[in-house]
Amino acid sequence: MSTPRRVVVVGAGMAAVRLADGLAGRAQVTLLGEEPHPPYNRILLSAVLEGTHAVDDISLRVPDHVDVRLGARAAQIHRAEREVELVDGRRVPYDTLVLATGSIPTLPPIRGLVRVDGRLDERVHAFRSLDDCLRLDAAVPGARAAVVVGGGLLGLQVARALSVRGLDTEVVEGGEHLLRSQVDGKAGRILARDLRRLGTTVYTGARAVRLTDEGLVLDNGFTLDTDLVVLTSGGRPSTALARRAGLTVRRGVVVDDGLASVDDPVVHAIGDCAEHGGRTTGFVPPAWEQAGILADRLAGSRATYAGSRTVARLRASGLDVAVLGDPEHIGGDVVEVTNPVLGSHRKLVVRDGVIVGATLVGDLSQIGLITQYYDRGTVLAQTEPGALLMAERPSRPSTLPDDAEVCACAGVTAGRVRACTSLEDVRASTHATTGCGGCADSVRSLLASRTLEGITP
């Protein structure tokens, strides 16, 4: 028997573990993780901060026989020798190298964040890693107030978690509304209203410019008295290692349809650090799709990557948001229903009868059906888009057709969930609920419906 091909993955995050899972039994896989912690679900860090999940709850299952090396920081790629050099001087040989280095935070231009000795002010916290989360978690009991800089998906998750923990929480967003990269002003205003209702103050169209002893100074003249400043805005693909290796890097590591570097066919990139077709992504579904395709290719398939659909979900208590595609920039007819009293905004972008984008805020009752139509490119009758948005009652998960998608991160259908015997079986065999966690309630309802129908899970 020939020796399995050596696949070395720089990174031990969600994309890397998904790739390792896809290669189980097909290759000899080594994950080089820079952090000291075993692989974990980064999307659920806000749930750890909120207190709804323990650290052990967000750990990722790594297949047996995968060599996971923790605290292994890669310093250099020696492409001619096909070796990765670590910061301690050790070298790891590879036949195939995969870069899954993710993204790194960048400091916003706020004076006073960094002290004269070069260290961050003790009030300042990033929120990208488990260590960041644990450090912030330890600071919460001694704090009274917190300011979250950034009104994107991560910022809202962190703000909600801190508010749940009892802190007076404020969000500062430089754009005119929250989630400006994903939703329009109507949806953003409803989110701001929901946050205020939940006890969080929101400042939009304002930028933090300076951190002083008195607090965080905004460009509108306000000074926010705070014990904690959490930075959630600003991040970029981690590409320094690829640059040093002489690989083509624009915003991310440029890859072809086989997810290989355009400079070296045995070096690949997936997840946040990869750039395909001029685009980088920052979401779980594209990263997992890339990992699955690359695993098949490395096992001999001719599968190619044509670009992923974007599905963004906000995971935060009391806030429900889902965005399909790029509804703010793609062309088409817009059908929308807004009810600020109920705190809901539903919007479809339809072109030639096909849903090409969608925004759902406050009411995700039709997310399964809308996602199904979106994925399939189903041509709808003229009255159907409006009917979808006017439906106020949720479709019971038990009534969803087997081919309706339940988990957007892993592309899992209702039928695949129904075929499982337990929640643990769902997680192990389909990866549903292990991404953003937005499908957890639907999955549990589908499993419960098996019992009601006389099928014992």
Image: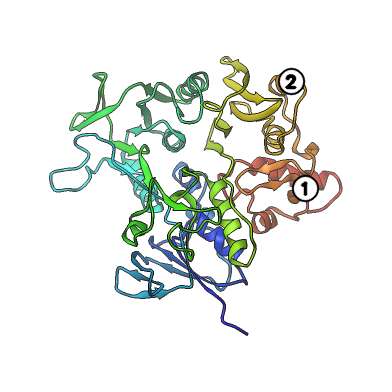
| Residue picked out by circle 2 | 387
355 in relation to 94, above or below:
above
Residue 110 picture quarter: top left
* Residue 327 point in image, percent of width and height: 56, 28
User: Residue, x 75% and y 47% (percent of image)?
Assistant: 447
Left or right, 419 with respect to 288, comes to right
Left or right, 169 with respect to 43, comes to left
- Which residue is at the front of the view, 82 or 132? 82
Q: Earlier in the sequence, mark 2 or mark 1?
A: 2
Classify the position of the N terminus by image quarter: bottom right
| Residue picked out by circle 1 | 415
Determine the secondary structure under disc 1: helix
* Residue 414 point in image, percent of width and height: 74, 45
Residue at the bottom extreme?
Answer: 1
> Disc 2 and disc 1: Cα gap in Å?
25 Å
Callout 1, which amino acid?
A: Gly
Packing grade of label 2 (10 A; few <14, some 14-19, many >=20) is: few
Callout 2, which amino acid?
A: Ala
Residue 167 picture quarter: top left
Packing grade of label 1 (10 A; few <14, some 14-19, many >=20) is: some
348 in relation to 54, above or below:
above
Determine the secondary structure under disc 2: helix
- Circles 2 and 1 in contact, beta carbons < 8 Å: no
